[in-house]
Image: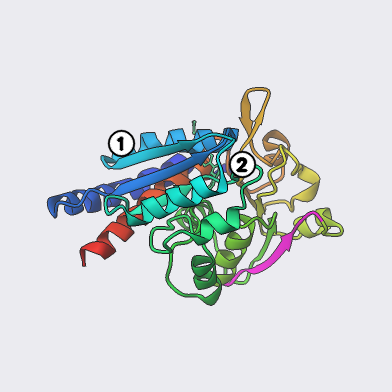
């Protein structure tokens, strides 16, 4: 079984992105990232902190806009409008989910699609579905970057995505299909998910349930991509039972050190391309 190392993928992208950032700085443009962190969700806290460190290592600005669990709808919408208008901000990364009581669709709708580097807006999701250029969610892009780095063929292959969330399941299914995979999306109402999962050449686990995918659901030799980030007893585990699935899979991403460690690189890529676009 091959371990698909996210850190190796991130390292492969790093040099080219660093070069682009240097070029931007020579033109007096320092890419600026606004991270919106509302509430106390653990994975969001982890991601925001890790993203801040990565931005620092790339030598550009990332600022966290922290709001409490009791933030109001108006505060959230005002914040997004403020960031839309701030020329130092090239991209907005808003941590999902937002606190209970906040209508996230309405907050997302406030976002300037050009600054929506995680592809949350209907405009960017529509562009993805239509096969147009745009900002696409960074976690699904990280999945694709891993498959690409390891030269995993997708054309004509059966891909099964477990989960249909707006940030992962749905966009990753569109990206896989765009690479000519035949994609099945499973969710909480799917009948006989185990059988469908077992037919996958490429299995993407993104349901957000700790260690739910076991060896009996995996075809021998399949490529398994674990998108899950779950905190269990102070430890971070994926949606895949790593030890069990590694006995049948052909290749598997670890957690941590897999998809998550490439997601931050995709944020850097998105912010750089947005900054470059503005210099033209
Ligand atoms: N709009 C939005 N987009 C997201 O993509 C999104 C989100 N909201 N909300 C929260 C979840 C969670 N998430 C993580 C991404 C990377 C790591 C990450 O970098 N993990 C490292 C470990 C970092 C460490 O060692 O601390 C790894 O897996 O290797 C963690 C969590 C993205 N999410």
**Between 140 and 134, which is closer to the camera in this rendering?**
134
Residue 179 occupies quadrant: bottom right
Residue 199's place in the image compared with 93, above or below, is: below
**Viewed as shown, does residue 132 lie left or right of 225?**
left
Task: Categorize mark 2 by other alpha carbons within 10 Å: few (<14), some (14-19), many (20+).
Answer: many
Q: Is mark 2 within 8 Å of ligand 1?
A: no
Q: Secondary structure at mark 2?
A: loop
Q: Which residue is the site of mark 2?
A: 99
Residue shown at 53% from the left, 54% from the top: 107
**Viewed as shown, does residue 16 lie left or right of 164?**
left
Earlier in the chain: of badge 2 and badge 1, it is 1
Residue 184 occupies quadrant: bottom right
**Between 77 and 271, which is closer to the camera in this rendering?**
77
> Which region of the structure is painted magenta?
180-188
Q: Which residue is the site of mark 1?
A: 57
* Rendered-image quadrant of the N terminus: top right
Where residue 278 appears, as percent x and y from the top left, is 25, 63
In the displayed image of the protein, which residue is found farthest to the top? 233
Where residue 194 appears, as percent x and y from the top left, is 82, 53
């Amino acid at each position: 079984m091959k371990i698909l190392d996210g850190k190796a993928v991130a390292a492969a992208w790093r040099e080219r992105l660093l070069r682009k950032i240097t070029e931007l700085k020579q033109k007096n443009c320092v890419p600026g990232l606004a991270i919106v962190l509302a509430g106390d969700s653990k994975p969001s806290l982890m991601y925001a902190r890790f993203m801040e460190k990565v931005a620092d290592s790339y030598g550009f600005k990332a600022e966290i806009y922290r709001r409490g669990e009791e933030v109001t709808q108006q505060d959230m919408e005002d914040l997004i409008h403020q960031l839309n208008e701030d020329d130092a901000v090239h991209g907005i990364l808003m941590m999902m989910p937002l606190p209970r009581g906040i209508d996230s669709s309405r907050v997302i709708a406030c976002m300037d699609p050009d600054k929506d580097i995680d592809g949350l807006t209907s405009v960017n999701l529509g562009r993805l579905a239509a096969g147009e250029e745009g900002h696409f969610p960074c976690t699904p892009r990280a999945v694709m970057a891993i498959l690409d780095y390891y030269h995993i063929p997708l054309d004509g292959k059966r891909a099964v995505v477990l989960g249909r969330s707006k940030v992962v399941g749905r966009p990753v299914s569109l990206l896989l299909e765009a690479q000519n995979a035949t994609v099945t999306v499973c969710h909480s109402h799917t009948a006989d998910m185990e059988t469908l999962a077992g037919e996958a050449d490429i299995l993407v686990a993104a349901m957000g349930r700790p260690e739910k995918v076991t060896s009996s659901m995996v075809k021998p030799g399949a490529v398994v991509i674990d998108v899950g980030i779950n905190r269990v007893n102070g430890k971070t585990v994926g949606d895949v039972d790593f030890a069990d699935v590694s006995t049948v899979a052909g290749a598997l991403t670890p957690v941590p050190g897999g998809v998550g460690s490439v997601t931050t690189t995709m944020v850097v890529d998105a912010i750089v391309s947005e900054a470059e676009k503005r210099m033209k």
